[in-house]
Image (tube, rainbow, N blue to C red):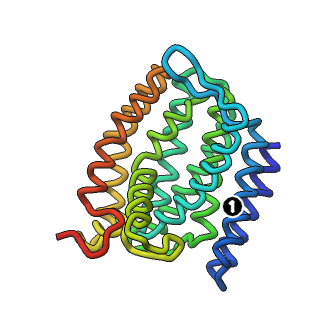
Amino acid sequence: MIAVAWFAGGGTIALVGYLDDRRGIAPALRFLVHLAAGVLVVVAVGGLPRIPWGDATVHLAATGWVIGVLAVVWSINLFNFMDGIDGLAAAQAAFVCVAGAALSLLGGAEVRLTMPLVVAGCALGFLFWNWAPARIFMGDAGSGFLGFALALVALDLARGGGPSLWVWLILHGTFVVDATVTLVTRLRDGDRVWEAHRKHAYQRLARAWRSHARVSATYAAVNVAWLLPWALVATLRPGSGAWVAAVALTPLVVSALWLGAGRTGDIR
């Protein structure tokens, strides 16, 4: 079933992204396709994994299925939102997959690591040509597929005894925080959130620094130096995942707000 989700869901997402790149697709239709892909992923993995909480685990039952589908949809769009400068999305995908696979082994989980390692290898190969100044670009076809693939990897490994969803949230921290703070700010300001824009923190930094490479390298450094150690803590102490995630992500939220994520204008 995982293979069906991988090829059918991922292939459809890539196809829709390609058509959107070439001629444009109505946002409502694109959302419906993403929703269907989310349902396919959650069905394939057998529902949302139990979530560690202190000495217990929380089973969300039917609510978990809804949250799982929406999480996949958000992941697909997350990478679409964050693929706006050279090297950023490919480096993030490689980091998340390699770190997730390593933490799975460290935690002693006997899970399927083929998918994350294949995605990491593809992302690194692409990154060689996508690093600033980029010679190739992934477009919606590539970014949407990456978001889909990483959601499938995270749910599959978490369901099979690998890193918990708290760990995956921490690993995705730079992207999740930047995109979420930007989206919430734009909603507050009454923006048409389905329209393209250049208000993400990483976009504002790229304009201020006049360098894609410097911004992508900074995000990668935050991943390795800050988020990876916290993800390790959450792996070794799964019951503490919620507060570890809060500690890891709070400084990123403060940084995104300070950088003006979602606001009009440039950094002064």
Question: Up-down: is 77 above or below 225?
Answer: below
Name the residue at 76% across, 36% down. Answer: 46
111 sits left or right of 202 in the view: right
Name the residue at 64% across, 34% down. Answer: 157
**Residue 265 location, quadrant:** bottom left
Kindly give the residue lying farthest to the bottom in the view shown.
23
Kindly give the residue lying farthest to the left in the view shown.
268
Name the residue at 63% across, 43% down. Answer: 67
150 sits left or right of 112 in the view: left
| Disc 1 residue crowd, few under 14, some 14–19, many 20+, Cα 10 Å | many
Name the quadrant of the C terminus. bottom left
Q: Between 165 and 216, which is closer to the camera in this rendering?
A: 165
Name the quadrant of the N terminus. top right
179 sits left or right of 28 in the view: left
State the image coordinates of residue 23 (x, y, percent, origin top left). Answer: 66, 85
Kindly give the residue lying farthest to the top in the view shown.
55
**Residue 31 location, quadrant:** bottom right
Question: Up-down: is 65 above or below 209?
Answer: above
State the image coordinates of residue 173 (x, y, percent, origin top left). Answer: 42, 46
Q: Amino acid at mark 1?
A: His
**Residue 13 location, quadrant:** bottom right
> Could you tell me how many numbered marks the image carries?
1
**Residue occupied by mark 1:** 34
State the image coordinates of residue 166 (x, y, percent, origin top left). Answer: 50, 34
State the image coordinates of residue 74 (x, y, percent, origin top left). Answer: 57, 55
Question: Up-down: is 42 above or below 104?
Answer: below
**Secondary structure category for the residue under label 1:** helix
Q: Between 198 and 6, which is closer to the camera in this rendering?
A: 198
